[in-house]
Image: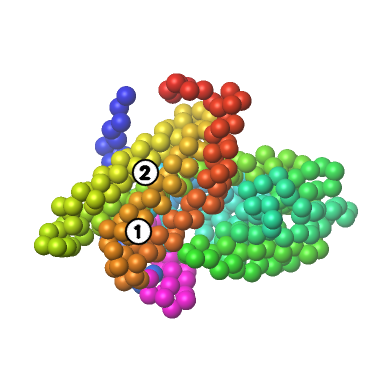
Amino acid sequence: MDFSLTAEERQIRDTVRSFVEKEVMPLEPEVLRNEREGRPGLEPDVLRELRAKARKSGFWGINTPEEYGGAALGPIMSAIIAMEIGRTFVPFSFGGSADNILYAGTDEQKQRYLIPTIEGERRSCFAITEPGAGSDARNIRARATRDGNEWIINGEKTFITGGNEADFVMVFALAEEHGVTCFLVDRDMGWTSEPIPTMGQWGPASLVFQDVRVPEENILGELGKGFELAMQWIGQGRYMIPARAIGSAERMLQMAVDYAKIRKSMGRTISEYQAIQWMIADSQVEIEAAKWLTLYAAWRVSQGMDARHASSIAKLNGAVMANQVVDRVLQIHGGMGYTKELPVERWYRELRLLRIFEGTDEIQRRTIARNLIKGHAKLGLIGE
């Protein structure tokens, strides 16, 4: 097995790391200041400027097909790039991408929704979660009733990422006897949103649909086949969640190492104490384990193999790892780590989300166990 990167892959990684260090990390004080003052981490104009700079460097549409102007770098490089972006808590991502299920649209839908989203002219959100349902994605109560060549949608969605900023939504509703169906619904068709305050920078929203009329041609995919589309969206890149967490954990661990070498207690630097050394060592081991589980899941995707089981393992392991590492790093920094003078407490709040969204720890464990019990996954196999 060859675990090395090609010269081209190393160059991409190093270029991204340089961009993050030179263009993104310097914005960290501004993000912390904005948060203390109750403002968004990054103003939209600043984010657009960053993405424009990245586009000039060739980083646009990391996973977008070349026919749509993307780089199509593939799952493994996408994971590696996510690790590099994760080294900063600045809410930044490269532009030029769109939800994978939008590619299932008709030619007319692609012109109205897919291409403008890739170009940054439109913003989408994915709405399946409902109040009281949580991880039970099948428990959909939103209804779509046919009225001639239109559908009338009624219902509520909650914890929708980007829901307060989006100008159109991919919403899932029960379309009479046909079953769950996905509808492309513009904001000006009548749905409303309300932000949900959280302990971190993640700003989800609740969405309300009250007699919202949607034309028949706005059905994405097939009537009654919406749940399959939803699972494609949810499973598209679950391994990307721990990928970004790995970058965060690596940077925080380096902060802890640097601090331990200068912080003195009882006449010695705390790096000389075994208790601190063990926290550093355990963190390194856990980060490396998460890294290879994540890259293995990405590799399976790149080979066209079923990656759902591997992705669940990577997501569960990475989420737990990140929370353990940030807790140790905060402990090593002591009282200073608990203050807002350092970014550790922010990461502490942000990384807690990983164990909840895109499938809770409990859901991942349930999935992994059921795959083994039902024989969908087998022990002792490599690359199969």
Whether residue 282 is situated above or below residue 350 in the rendered picture: above
Q: Which residue is mark 2?
A: 80
Question: What amino acid is labelled 1 in the image?
Answer: Thr
Residue 13 seen by the camera = no
Q: Label 2 crowding class (10 Å Cα cut-off): few <14, some 14-19, many 20+?
A: many
Which range of residues does the magenta coloring cover?
32-59
Count of numbered badges drawn on the protein: 2
> In which image quadrant can residue 43 be found?
bottom left
In this rendering, would 360 be left or right of 24? right
In this rendering, would 142 be left or right of 202? right
Q: Which mark is residue 88?
A: 1
- At horizontal 49% and vertical 45% (from top left) the residue drawn is 64
Q: Say which element carries label 2.
A: helix
- At horizontal 30% and vertical 44% (from top left) the residue drawn is 282
| Secondary structure predominantly adopted by residues drawn in magenta | helix
> In which image quadrant can residue 211 be found?
bottom right
* Disc 2/disc 1 C-alpha distance (Å): 14 Å
In magenta segment, residue 162: no
Q: Nearer the viewer, residue 81 or 129?
A: 129
Q: Quadrant of the N terminus?
A: top left
- Spot the residue most to the right: 148
